[in-house]
Amino acid sequence: MTAVHMEREQEGGLAGGQTGPERRRPGAPSAAQLAVTALQTMIESGPFTPGAPLPPQRELAATLKVSRATLREALSILATLGLVSIEPGRGTFVRARTGDEGEQPPAPSWRFAARYSPAEVYQFRYIAESHAAQLAAMNHTEAEIAELQENLVRFRAAAQANDIAAFAQIDFDFHRLIMRFSRNRLLADMHASFGRVLLESSRLPARRDRLWEPVREHERVVEALTMGDPEGTGYFMRRHLSRTADRAGIVLTELV
């Protein structure tokens, strides 16, 4: 393992293309995602109340039948989603439910703060993904449109079920597909190389009464892309990313 690879592993796996999200078959949840969904259910309808500590990790891992490493990843995801707070030396605590009308999303737990701010990530996404969307509108195939439509079906289902972990993963998959369909290998490789960071940006918490907004925004992107309208596709992608950042409490200058 090279020094660069060791550094990236120590930073939490910034190069997530080969070892992270890219190796997961689209539509197949990872072990950590399954654990997140189970914990979300336990938090929202089970024995864990706001402010209460979660059981020790060894006990919780045994209950969920997952490894400690998988549980730690799941708890990190839950912290980014705003469902728990991890307090070193004290434990993990359930956060008060957010997302009801009039409530603001919690401050994000951002594991890549030493390298990039959430605003920097969204600035990159705004530029790269809007251009990729324009290229995809000029180069797509019927099979690729079918993939995007299938992704939309799963995205709607996750929003309907209020499964925010699956919702974030499917959102990431949508943008990964757009980058791949651009036919620009450098854009696709950059997205893969920083897959963990970009997936984390999809997990930043937003009000739950606004989950259908990104669904409609994805629909607009796919409609314009299907029509072979690069200008419209780029416009709707920029609008989507700007609004997504806003829902996470990030100010992003929109260039339309």
Image (cartoon, helix red, strand yellow):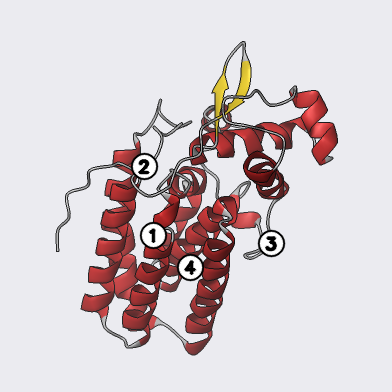
* Residue plotted at (63% across, 46% down): 19
Checking the image for residue 28, the label placed there is: 3
Under circle 2, the secondary element is: loop
Under circle 1, the secondary element is: helix
Q: Is residue 48 above or below residue 151?
A: above
The Cα–Cα distance between marks 3 and 4, rounded to whole angstroms, is 15 Å
* Residue plotted at (48% across, 46% down): 203
User: Could you tell me residue 70's position as x and y percent?
Assistant: 72, 37
Q: Which residue is mark 4?
A: 177
In this rendering, position of residue 117 left or right of residue 8: left
Residue at the outermost top position: 89
Q: Are marks 3 and 4 in contact (CB under 8 Å)?
A: no
**Mark 2 or mark 1: whose residue is earlier in sequence:** 2
User: Could you tell me residue 87's position as x and y percent?
Assistant: 56, 18
Instruction: Give the amino acid at mark 2.
Output: Glu
Q: Are marks 1 and 3 in contact (CB under 8 Å)?
A: no
Q: Residues within 10 Å of mark 4 (few under 14, many from 20)?
A: many
| Number of numbered labels in the structure image | 4
Instruction: Give 68 or 166, whichever is nearer the viewer.
Output: 166
Q: Residues within 10 Å of mark 2 (few under 14, many from 20)?
A: few
**Mark 4 or mark 1: whose residue is earlier in sequence:** 4
Under circle 4, the secondary element is: helix
Q: Which residue is mark 1?
A: 187
Under circle 3, the secondary element is: loop
Instruction: Give the amino acid at mark 4.
Output: Leu
Instruction: Give 132 or 112, whichever is nearer the viewer.
Output: 112
Q: Which residue is mark 2?
A: 103
**Mark 3 or mark 4: whose residue is earlier in sequence:** 3
